[in-house]
Image (spheres, rainbow, N blue to C red):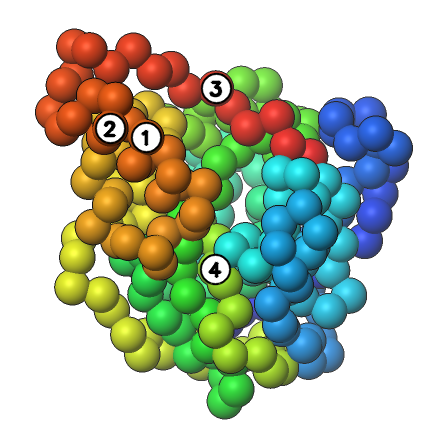
Amino acid sequence: MKLLSVNLGRPKAVPYTDHPQGMTGIDKQPVDTPVRVAAPGPKGFGASGLAGDSVCGTRHHGGDDQAVYAMAREDLDEWEGALGRTLPNGSFGENLTTEGVDLSGARIGERWAVGSEVVLEVTSGRIPCRTFQGHLGEKGWVKRFTQRGAPGAYLRVIRPGEIRAGDAIQIVHRPGHEVTVALQFRAATTEQTLLPLLLAAGDALHPEALARARKHKEKYGEGNEERSGEKYVADPGS
């Protein structure tokens, strides 16, 4: 398992974002130099966990629990076949493009050592937004990405340091529960009745996802498919 590329984005004016100034940092490009990784601060104030990377819409993106976004090269390859187009590393706005890592099967709270210094922890899957759709230029992209259910993973920084392309990735902690990125994503989008299952991940889960799971259980209990009328709405973030 290794890190194929580290991808950074600079602010760019586009017509497809809800950001007040029309800016986004989703266009990530691979870099050859080492990159410092550290916790950026709380959501709404902190942006990206990678030095030199931009997150413009901090209301919905960035912060300690979404400090780093990883996407598997294997998933990008499958999308290349489905879309009939080339998708270079960074195409999905990911900071890290990985090889040999089962991101959908990664458990919430799973910890990765990247290179010799950095330790990251999986917090949730990525919810697609309209900026993501505009960036790719694919009609109906939010729905299509959601239906496939392989969203990549957000990570928080447990131990800061430098990383670079080619670094080894090692799973150094794997929790005993069965709450995977794929399960969390399905619960957050198409199968909200699964939300109570996420509570097994505890505080390792993204705080917003944890709060939603607790609220759902309080309101509906467990296994009440008929009573739960929640509907998935795409993240409007930019």
Comparing 2 with 208, the one in front is 208
Do residues under tags 2 and 1 come within 8 Å of each other at their CB atoms? Answer: yes
Dot 1: element: helix
Camera-near label (1 vs 3) is 1
Q: Residue furthest left?
A: 223
Comparing 229 with 22, the one in front is 229
Q: Position of residue 17 (x, y in %)?
A: 75, 28
Q: CA distance from mark 2 to mark 4?
A: 27 Å
Report the residue at 69% width, 34% height from top: 238
Q: Position of residue 49 (x, y in %)?
A: 64, 64
Q: Amino acid at mark 4?
A: Leu
Residue that mark 1 sits on: 215
Q: Amino acid at mark 3?
A: Val
Report the residue at 62% width, 44% height from top: 61
Is 229 left or right of 82, judged from the image as shown?
left
Q: Is residue 169 above or below residue 186?
A: below
For marks 2 and 3, the one nearer the N-term is 2
Q: Amino acid at mark 2?
A: Glu
Question: Residue 155 bears which disc, if any?
Answer: 4
Do residues under tags 4 and 3 come within 8 Å of each other at their CB atoms? Answer: no
Camera-near label (4 vs 1) is 1
Figure quadrant of the N terminus? bottom left
Report the residue at 72% width, 40% height from top: 57
For marks 4 and 3, the one nearer the N-term is 4
Do residues under tags 2 and 4 come within 8 Å of each other at their CB atoms? Answer: no
Q: Is residue 115 above or below residue 134?
A: below
Question: Residue 218 bears which disc, if any?
Answer: 2
Residue that mark 3 sits on: 233
Q: CA distance from mark 2 to mark 1?
A: 5 Å
For marks 4 and 1, the one nearer the N-term is 4
Crowding at mark 3 (Cα within 10 Å: few <14, some 14-19, many 20+):
few
